[in-house]
Amino acid sequence: MPISIALATDKLPEKGSLIITATDGGKLGALGKQLDKKIGGAISKAIKIKKFKGKPASMFALLAPAKSDLDRIVVLGVGDGKKLSAFDAEKMGGTALGAVEKAEGNVTFLLEPLGSNVADGEIAARAAVGAYLRDYKFETYKTKNKSSGGPKKFTVATKAATAAKKAYAELKVIADGTIVARDLVNEPSNILTPPEFAKRAKALTKLGVKVEVLSEAQMKKLGMGSLLGVGQGSVQPSQMVVMQWNGAAKSKQPVAFIGKGVCFDTGGISIKPAGGMEDMKGDMGGAAAVTGLIHALASRKAKVNAVGVIGLVENMPDGNAQRPGDIVTSMSGQTIEVLNTDAEGRLVLADALWYTQKRFKPQFMIDLATLTGAILIALGQDYAGMFASDDRLAEQLTEIGNAEGEKVWRMPMNDNFDKMINTPNADMKNIGGRYAGSSTAAQFLKRFTNNVPWVHLDIAGTAMGSPKSATSRTWASGYGVRLLDRLVKAHYEK
Ligand code: BES
Ligand code: MN
Ligand code: ZN
């Protein structure tokens, strides 16, 4: 549905639905009070009867209020207006849209000044983008019973409309990057094969991104035996996609983002149990986030040189699939004993990381991967696991993650974890022991970073199977796009 921002005047809308806010203690703003008066005090009476305290996300609705042509008035609690952060405003916008899911016609979300030290224009823009993200649905394959109805239009009305419109235009572009990632992760694996994913990444060309697709033959020539071993049991060809957004001077070292793109992970010969295996359609969440990020950076013409590299494969059991015990040679020259074919993500990233640092000499590399089930056990679904060889980058990500609602939690790396992947038969094996599974996976990746400042984000818990929130109602959250876009914006543009 169209979501927009309009100038709030003293004349209140007379048709459709109207959402107003109440702060701590159920206090209305000036226009809210004016409306209350117009309809004979029904709002203040309801606040009293309900003992409505204006707690964040609490609400009530008056339907068909007398002396008014409005369908409904929703009163939405926002808590202590002074403490409202930009991210709170976003959740508030999502909640506001949720409150009128069943409404028809136009909806106006009237945002009066709430006393926050975040500017009113920014608050309104954030509310609009929260509504925009909440509105996302994945219904491509529904031929009937699609969600129907809902508002015709959702307008955030604010006195700071000029500033709000400007801020919303930029935020929406980032949200569109998140939606690119959500769409990719939600797609089923019979549709989103490695070549189809590559095709969709290629579409970024129209935003000015340079996109290259490496074929199996090209990767073989480069010596990517680690990545190619994973895909060899699939009828789908493996591909590597390199996306370059050049928004800064040529001389400027790029920043690099690398994504795990396992388009389906059966586990291979070390096959996974049947229950829940369908979730492994989302095992390309890292690659989706990188693609969404480059989409966002290019759309807003970020003043940065950024590289996105994604390794696209399908991990299948087959007569030609790799076996437990096989030894492969990675592009780095290091050999790997594949003791479990289900630990395939690190095999893909090994070659993608090596290739990236070798070709682009980046300032840093950040990889995203739905890498281990163990990270879900450790951190659940609220935090991505962060492993870093660079403290500054880790601190920047922690701060931005907290502010933007895409949180990271730093996990340990050390020499003892590293030793756990040694094997007598090759330079390393692709699994550690029973313990510290996410850390041994990270140590494995580190061996392919060639000491370039690096962060690994294990997003197995945050990218898919996401709990419903104020701004996301869908299986795929699109985690990572916003976090990394804001990282670039805050620290790596000119
Ligand atoms: N794609 C999985 C990890 C995963 C699990 C992602 C659950 C999302 C939800 C990964 O390839 C995998 O299978 N990892 C194994 C590693 C093990 C064999 C060392 C795991 O976590 O069990
Ligand atoms: Mn696996
Ligand atoms: Zn996997």
Image: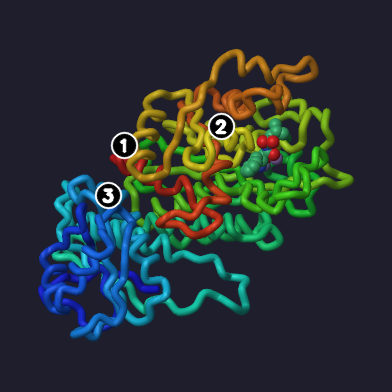
Instruction: Please report whichever mark, 2 or 3, sits nearer to the chain's N-terminal start.
Output: 3
Of residues 289 and 119, which is closer to you in this image? Answer: 119
In the rendered image, the vertical position of residue 348 relative to residue 4, given as above or below: above
Question: Given the image, on which type of amino acid does mark 2 rest?
Answer: Ala
In the rendered image, the vertical position of residue 278 relative to residue 218, given as above or below: below
Q: Residues within 10 Å of mark 2 (few under 14, many from 20)?
A: some
Distance (Cα) linking label 2 and label 1: 30 Å
User: Under 8 Å from ligand 1: the CB of mark 2?
Assistant: no
Mark seen at residue 378: 2
Give left or right: position of 337 versus 253: right
Report helix, strand or loop for mark 2. helix
- Rendered image quadrant of residue 107: bottom left
Residue drawn at x 41%, y 60% as measured from the top left: 133
Assign the C terminus to one quadrant of the image.
Answer: top left
Residue 90 percent across, percent down from the top left:
32, 55
Q: Residues within 10 Å of mark 3 (few under 14, many from 20)?
A: many
Of residues 69 and 329, which is closer to you in this image? Answer: 69
Mark seen at residue 86: 3
User: Under 8 Å from ligand 1: the CB of mark 1?
Assistant: no
Distance (Cα) linking label 1 and label 3: 19 Å
